[in-house]
Amino acid sequence: MWNYKTPGIPDDAFERSESVPITKEEVRVIQISKARLCPGYTVYDIGCGSGSISIEAAIQVESGKVIAIDYDPNAIELTKKNIEKFGLTNISVILGNAKEKISELDLADAIFVGGTGGDTEEIVNLCQNKLKSGGRIVIGIILIETLYSVLKSLEKLQFDSVDITQVTISKSRKTSTGTMMLARNPVTIISATKI
């Protein structure tokens, strides 16, 4: 389905649903690069939504594995459809509250934290114990309050190489008179390394 090693699968290549969010293509590319994935890695995708991060990560880790978690049954079904569409076999899908499921998982080399229903800070705290030394955490944030609380948590947990990148994307759309640029909501990406 995607015949390239580089991330950046177009959004329209994924099965989509109005009720299930997707991490947009350009934001996804940055998040994947910030995770610094290698073949053989174990990766969590917490709040997997449509599974777009899981798909991109699974391609990068090759023989490794991705664990996709979401509490929304619609998101889990959509993620499963996308796994099948892309023909991937190294993704496991878990329906449930990440705060309860994280403790049951193997140690991770990288963790993506996305839609968490307002529990991002608590999930980051739980992930600290499940991330290998030198492992990377990448958190996609849209709310200023979440940004502040996550930064405080990362500082308290003594993560290293904390990077904050805000991404504002505009995409072109043809109109009857030409091409216009439509802005998408900005996303802040925090990435850090566990000491």
Image: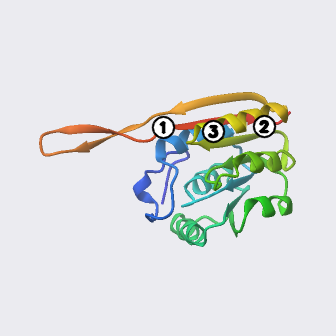
Q: Mark 3 points at which residue?
A: 145
Instruction: Provide the residue designation for mark 2.
Output: 153
Could you say which is closer to the camera, residue 120 or residue 4? 120
Which residue is farthest front? Answer: 145
Q: In terms of image quadrants, where is residue 135?
A: top right
Q: For the residue marked with disc 2, what is the amino acid?
A: Ser
85 and 26: which is toward the camera:
26
Q: Position of residue 26 (x, y in %)?
A: 48, 41
- Of marks 1 and 2, which one's residue comes earlier in the chain? 2
Taking the image as shown, residue 22 lies to the left or right of residue 60, namely left
Rendered location of residue 147, percent (x, y): 64, 37
The answer, for residue 105, to whether it is visible in the render is: yes
> How far apart are labels 1 and 2 at the CA level?
22 Å
Label 3 and label 1: CA atoms lie apart by 14 Å
Q: Is residue 6 visible?
A: no
At label 1, the amino acid type is Pro
Q: Residue 186 carries which label?
A: 1
Marked residue nearer the N-terminal end (3 or 1): 3
For mark 2, give the secondary structure: helix
Q: Is residue 74 above or below residue 136?
A: below
Q: Circle 1 — which element?
A: loop
Q: For the residue labelled by badge 3, is the local secondary structure a helix, a strand or a loop?
A: helix
> Hey, which quadrant is residue 16 in on the image?
bottom left
Disc 2 crowd rating (10 Å Cα; few below 14, some 14-19, many 20+) is some
Front residue (pair 38, 128): 128
User: Where is residue 65 drawn, in percent x and y?
Assistant: 73, 58
**Upstream in sequence: badge 3 or badge 2:** 3
Check whether the beta carbons of the residues at disc 3 and disc 2 lie within 8 A of each other.
Answer: no
- Label for residue 94? none
Distance from label 3 to label 2 (Cα)? 13 Å
